Image (tube, rainbow, N blue to C red):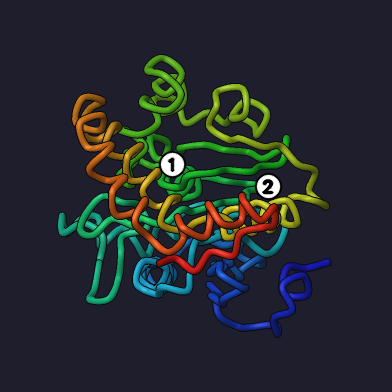
Amino acid sequence: MILTEMFSQPASDEHLVVFKRKHCLVMMFNRPKKYNAFTPQMYSTLAKAYYRIQHDSDIRCGLLVAEGDHFTAGLELEKWAPIFASGDGMPLGEGEIDPFGITGERLTKPLVIAIHGICFTVAVELLLNTDIRLATADSRLAQIEVKRGIFPCGGATVRLPQQIGWGNAQRYLMTGDEFSGDDAYRFGLVQQIEPMENIHLAAIEMVEKISSVAPLGVQASLSSSRTATLQGESVAMGQLFEKLVPVAQSEDAKEGVMSFLERRDAVFKGR
């Protein structure tokens, strides 16, 4: 079953299809004949989708997937080369959030990604800026920029050492060698391995779990973890009870208590 059928969406000629599914915004690479090669236009569409996730109160998380046999073979380099050579960075516009999390506003809602097949360059760097990752065991991940005369500029040089360790990261950053989905799972880079026929269903189950719990609690938890990573553990620890107050005083917190006392599933509204 192709993704457009699974998500009950009509086939589209758009290279990156964005649509809402319950409380989740699904972002789907849809250029399978070109191995989902990532263009500047796809970047802009994805950046607008991230902005929508952040600013639409009814959206509680995002899901990034791809149609076809491969997640993405990476950047369509001939279209990106002039942008990189200019030194101006990623072409971020108004109403957009950088999907690589390098400049500007940061997304504060959770992102889930499901990868498969070839997952080169941009695929790894998008993955590094998500929160929960699923992969097939035979996924092929690589930062091959050094084989093309450049180096990763979407965050991998910073985040890959943080997430899989210095030596492991340099092993792949400086050679351009591939590593598998199983390797990524062993490194802790992905959290769940699924067969190809089940990976997108598993991703849907994951975002539905996230969407079913208290949105304010999820966002505060993510914020605390990110503060610890970016500003240090002591800063995050010092903010715990300050950040807890508005969450504990929310309608959702009251609903959480009542649902416990009444022995029923909670119905959270994000306020």
Whether 249 is drawn above or below 16: the answer is: above
Q: Is residue 72 left or right of residue 250?
A: right
Q: CA distance from mark 2 to mark 1?
A: 17 Å
Q: Which mark is residue 117?
A: 2
Q: Is residue 226 left or right of residue 119?
A: left
Nearer to us of marks 2 and 1 is 1
Instruction: Name the residue beneath numbered marker 1.
Output: 128
What residue is at 46 percent from the left and 60 percent from the top? 252
Q: Quadrant of the C terminus?
A: bottom left
Of residues 89 and 259, the one nearer the viewer is 259
Q: Quadrant of the N terminus?
A: bottom right
What residue is at 33 percent from the left and 45 percent from the top? 223
* Disc 2 to disc 1: CB gap under 8 Å: no
In the displayed orientation, state which residue is furthest to the left: 87
Tell me the element at label 2. Answer: loop
Circle nearer the N terminus (2, 1) = 2
Q: Amino acid at mark 2?
A: Gly
